[in-house]
Image (cartoon, coloured by chain):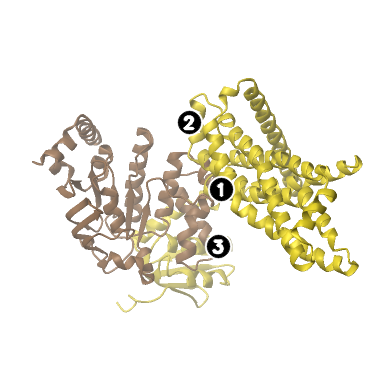
Chain colours: A brown, B yellow
């Protein structure tokens, strides 16, 4: 009876259909070339990771996909719609379908945690305050925050709690698509592991597609179905983590075969064996 | 299926069956929620939730449905659910398993006396903190007199330029206009009595003794006091102040004292400059409206306006400066939270410093009156 793979929101889209199509995107800031002909596709239901070194344009690509930046050339389609339309007012139904968790949390500092999480509900629905309160409390419970933190302000929360609060705000509208910018950066290993588990758990429960930018190799091994490695403005390699470790590209090899890469892989292999 | 595009709806059939249809999702479920809130539930017996018509469901729909279920149970109904898809049932059980946490009311409830108590404690703590800050600043200032080499000349001079020199145009223009206004208002009355020459007394004494120092102080409180609060507050939010402390440096010595010293120097100078322009404004109107020539004005000025009026006005300025700079810096250091705390404390710094400046000025007036000055 329990079937995890069924989508919770019955729509006409089926699993395996592209949710995001990035085709031939180039980005230049002045004379600095960030992307040079980047193409990739994210399909429904997968966890897609964008990896790469510092300054490889990972976060820029994410910002372009969610419509905060416009690429110099090329086309980005989100649910089949040109992402440039996100800036226009009729892009709002599209905004409801995805949630973004920013790196620093980007919680509104003048609001309590509960008010922060309630913002999308207040803006996008006509629900009564009582129901909004219940949905907010549910989402706060789902990300594993204690309920008494709901009345606290972001400045009163620890870094890990702020990250969870940002996740609660990103998933409050039950988005089909969740963007995560460096979800585990700056968290201690224990909390980062917990965060990975939490993401997997919520993905099973709520059935969203995840696109994340990260260079946390442990997170990549544990969560990502497919990974695109950016470097020199191009996609250097794309596939499962196992595929990428056999890549011929020197940068990708270095990325995954450095001491940290090997350690993360061994640890992942260990957990898989342990579970079996 | 024809109910694909159906809106979320709910209806009570024959008093025993609740038919739920349509997309029970966050953007669509609001009308259903309104109907359910006004629903008259049967008080006893069985109630059937017919849910096979729900074709889209998310946590929002689950919360609404779960609330309806608990409400019906609370009224004493025997509730059964029929036709709910298994993946939707999972969402319902997800909501149910977290309902304990959801239903817990976490808003702290305090009665009137507790609130009063908290607010009094809060205020007392503020007074104590303010006094502590005054003490710290004074002792740091005394230390500087012992070891003047530790004065931060660069910050001091920079502050002198930004808060003194750059304020010249605006203070000059404002006091000039104030001089014009006072002379205009006085001219009307003085002409009635034919005592035109007393315009000199009116403009000279009121400007030099009271108005120029006050106007300059209020202007600088808005211009520099607020800037101090915002600068120091932002440094606090971005942990720059903590970095300063880890170098073994004192934020008071590094940030507060240079600003206080610079303003104590700048404000009397600005006041003297404002005096000149204010009197000049009055002089223009006197010659224009009252036929008091510049020469007559200036010779009368010598007799009528005693030196003490100028000295009292200038003498108050350093105290105003200390109040403005200390309040601004203190409010900056009080900032704890984030962005909007900066705005709040900046506003408080301006209001508080103007308030204290006027109080101080009033006390001065009373005391000087007692001493017949």
**Mark found first going from the N terminus, 1 or 2:** 1
Q: Residue at x 59, y 53 (%)?
A: B169
Q: Position of residue A107 (x, y in %)?
A: 46, 50
Contact between marks 1 and 2 (CB within 8 A): the answer is no
Q: Residue furthest front?
A: B295
Q: In this rendering, do the residues under marks 1 and 3 share a single chain? A: no
A129 left or right, relative to A32? right
Residue B176 placement: quadrant: bottom right
Contact between marks 3 and 2 (CB within 8 A): the answer is no
B159 left or right, relative to B265? left
Disc 2 crowd rating (10 Å Cα; few below 14, some 14-19, many 20+) is: some
| Disc ID at residue B166 | 1
- Given residues B323 and B102, the one toward you in this image is B323
- Given residues B313 and B123, the one toward you in this image is B313
In the displayed structure, B16 sits above or below A253; it is below
Q: Quadrant of the C terminus of chain A?
A: top left
| Label 3 sits on residue | A129
Disc 3 crowd rating (10 Å Cα; few below 14, some 14-19, many 20+) is: few
Can residue A1 be seen in the rendering of this structure? no
In the displayed structure, B256 sits above or below B275; it is above
Q: Secondary structure at mark 2?
A: helix
Give me the chain letter of mark 2: B
Q: Position of residue A56 (x, y in %)?
A: 23, 45
Give me the chain letter of mark 3: A
| Label 2 sits on residue | B243
Closer to the eye: label 3 or 2: 2
């Amino acid at each position: 009876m329990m079937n995890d793979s069924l989508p919770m929101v019955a729509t006409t889209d089926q699993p395996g259909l592209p949710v995001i199509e990035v085709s031939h995107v180039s980005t230049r800031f002045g004379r600095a070339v960030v992307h040079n002909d980047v193409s990739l596709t994210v399909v429904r239901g997968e966890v897609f990771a964008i990896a790469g070194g510092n300054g490889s344009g990972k976060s820029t690509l994410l910002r372009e996909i969610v419509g905060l930046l416009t690429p110099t050339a090329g086309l980005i389609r989100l649910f089949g719609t040109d992402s440039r339309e996100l800036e226009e007012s009729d892009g709002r139904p599209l905004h409801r379908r995805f949630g973004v968790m920013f790196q620093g949390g980007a919680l509104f500092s003048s609001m309590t945690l509960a008010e922060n999480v309630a913002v999308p509900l207040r803006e996008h629905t006509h629900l009564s305050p009582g129901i909004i309160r219940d949905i907010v409390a549910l989402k706060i419970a789902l990300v594993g925050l204690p309920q008494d933190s709901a009345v606290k302000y972001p400045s009163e929360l620890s870094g890990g709690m702020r990250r969870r609060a940002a996740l609660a705000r990103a998933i409050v509208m039950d988005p089909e698509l969740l963007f995560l910018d460096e979800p585990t950066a700056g968290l201690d290993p224990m909390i980062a592991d917990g965060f990975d588990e939490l993401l997997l758990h919520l993905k099973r429960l709520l059935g969203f597609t995840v696109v994340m930018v990260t260079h946390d190799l442990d997170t990549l091994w544990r969560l990502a179905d497919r990974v695109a490695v950016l470097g020199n403005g191009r996609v250097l390699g794309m596939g499962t983590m196992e595929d990428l470790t056999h890549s011929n590209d020197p940068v990708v090899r270095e990325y995954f075969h450095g001491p940290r890469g090997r350690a993360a892989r061994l640890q992942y292999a260990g957990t898989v064996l342990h579970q079996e | 299926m024809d109910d694909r595009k159906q809106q979320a709806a709910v209806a009570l059939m024959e008093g025993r069956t609740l038919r739920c249809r349509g997309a029970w999702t966050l953007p669509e479920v609001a009308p259903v929620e309104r109907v359910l809130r006004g629903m008259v539930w049967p008080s006893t017996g069985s109630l059937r939730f017919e849910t096979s018509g729900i074709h889209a469901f998310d946590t929002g729909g689950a919360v609404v449905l779960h609330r309806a279920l608990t409400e019906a149970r609370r009224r004493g109904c025997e509730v059964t659910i029929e036709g709910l898809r298994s993946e939707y049932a999972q969402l319902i059980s997800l909501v149910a398993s977290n309902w304990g946490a959801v239903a817990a009311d976490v808003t702290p409830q305090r009665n009137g006396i507790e609130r009063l108590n908290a607010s009094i404690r809060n205020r007392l703590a503020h007074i104590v903190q303010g006094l502590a800050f005054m003490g710290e600043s004074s002792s740091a200032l005394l230390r500087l007199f012992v070891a003047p080499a530790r004065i931060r000349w660069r910050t001091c001079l920079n502050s002198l330029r930004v808060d003194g020199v750059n304020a010249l145009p605006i203070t000059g223009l404002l006091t000039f206009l104030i001089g014009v206004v006072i002379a205009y208002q006085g001219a009307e009355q003085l002409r009635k009595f034919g005592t035109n020459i007393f315009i000199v007394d009116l403009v000279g004494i009121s400007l030099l003794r009271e108005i120029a120092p006050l106007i300059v102080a209020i202007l600088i409180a808005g211009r520099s006091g607020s800037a101090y609060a915002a600068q120091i507050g932002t440094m606090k939010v971005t942990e720059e102040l903590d970095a300063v402390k880890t170098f073994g440096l004192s934020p008071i010595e590094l940030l507060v004292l240079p600003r206080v010293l610079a303003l104590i120097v700048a404000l009397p100078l600005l006041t003297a400059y404002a005096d000149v322009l204010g009197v000049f404004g009055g002089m223009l109107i006197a010659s224009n409206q009252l036929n008091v020539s510049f020469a007559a004005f200036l010779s009368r000025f010598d007799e009528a306006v005693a030196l003490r009026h100028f000295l009292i006005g200038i003498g108050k300025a350093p105290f105003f400066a200390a109040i403005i700079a200390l309040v601004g810096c203190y409010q900056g250091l009080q900032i704890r939270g984030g962005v909007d705390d900066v705005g709040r404390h900046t506003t408080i710094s301006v209001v508080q410093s103007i308030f204290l400046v006027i109080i101080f000025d009033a006390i001065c007036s009373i005391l000087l009156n007692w001493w017949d000055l």
